[in-house]
Amino acid sequence: QTSGRASTASSSTMASLSTASTLGTSFATRRGRITRRAASASSSSRTPEKDESVVRDRQSLSFKDSATGVDVTLVGTMHYNPVSIELASSTVTRLREADALHAVVLESCPSRWKKTQKTQPPGSFLRWFLYNEMLAAADAAGDPTKIRLGDQRIEDLGACAKRTMADTARDVLDPLGGGWGRLVRDWRDGFKKEIDGRGDARGNLRAADLWCDVALLLGMPVSMFRYPMAWAIKSPKVIVPFAAFAWGIERIPSLVRPGALDAVTGAYVMSGEERLVSALFLALDVAEVVFISRLFLKALLETRNDVLSRSIRDACEESARSGGGGVVAVLGAAHLNGVQLRLMGDGDD
């Protein structure tokens, strides 16, 4: 009997272990499935599906405005580049010939456009010498009533830039009061919204769309010559002080007392003035990164993208009311992703 009870106990113990093992295996299997499902869900959330509603063509993006359903084409340009001029002109011409063009929105404002028309009248040398994508798009439209000047007024842009520079100076001097935190937050949020936009997978303008276009790159020297030349002719009050400042900074090293070679080691030893100039240039390098990057993201992109997208939306609403065609916007390439984000309903209106 003792032997039988022992055998029964042993059998019971083995059964319990077997049951525990089975339950453990089952729980592990379920846990594995749950983990795999979570990983799959996380992976799918990190990698958005490709948005088939956006059509990329070189440096242009075509899609429907989320509020009106009107067809919008954003043409991203490298200012004064012959390839960008051709793209803007051909895009507008194609829609005009198909009787599918309602309006052309230009990255310009009344003051700048008036100055352009005054300094570059049709048939003039400057019209040919400084011909750009805005003029090309307006010429291709063939009808001045289709032109919309959609950018922020240059007067307002100047005031906005001054406020941004003043805010940046205050934040740089207030690290303990959250100033540096605001700088980092503006850089992070600005890059995500204005540069990355909807993301590559959802149809924004990619860096490869610019840098892999050989013809566009070959035209870059033309842009680098024409753009500052246009600024010098149209806005000498801006370009002359800037050029004078750059020339003065470049001259500083030649005005200080040079160092000398150490008599023992033969190594060059900087003079006190040279050390001071080196420290000055380092401070200028840091300030350039801090101030220019925030100015670019806030005043030149975020604020202007708000204005540009609102202008394009207004043109779309006009088209929707009149049953007209699509809207083409000719912009600098840096504006495309932020404007697209707003018009497709993923960003602020």
Image (cartoon, grey):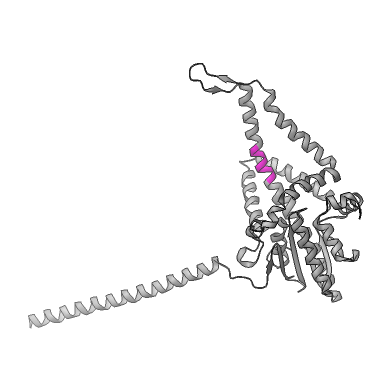
Determine which quarter of the picture holds residue 141: bottom right
Check residue 343 for magenta coloring.
no
Asked whether residue 173 appears in the rendered view, the answer is: no
Task: Identify which residue, 132 or 145, lies in the foreground.
Answer: 132
Task: Identify which residue, 172 or 188, lies in the foreground.
Answer: 188
Q: Residue furthest top?
A: 263
Residue at 85 percent across and 55 percent down: it is: 109
Q: Left or right: 55 with respect to 312? A: left
Counting every numbered tag in the picture gives 0
Task: Identify which residue, 343 or 183, lies in the foreground.
Answer: 343
Counting from the top left corner in percent of width and height, residue 251 is at: 71, 28
Residue at 70 percent across and 31 percent down: it is: 250
Determine which quarter of the picture holds residue 92: bottom right
Query: Which quadrant would the N terminus be assigned to in this image?
Result: bottom left
Residue at 70 percent across and 23 percent down: it is: 255
Check residue 287 for magenta coloring.
yes
Counting from the top left corner in percent of width and height, residue 276 is at: 63, 26
Instruction: Give the magenta-colored segment's residue range.
Output: 285-292
Counting from the top left corner in percent of width and height, residue 38 is at: 47, 70
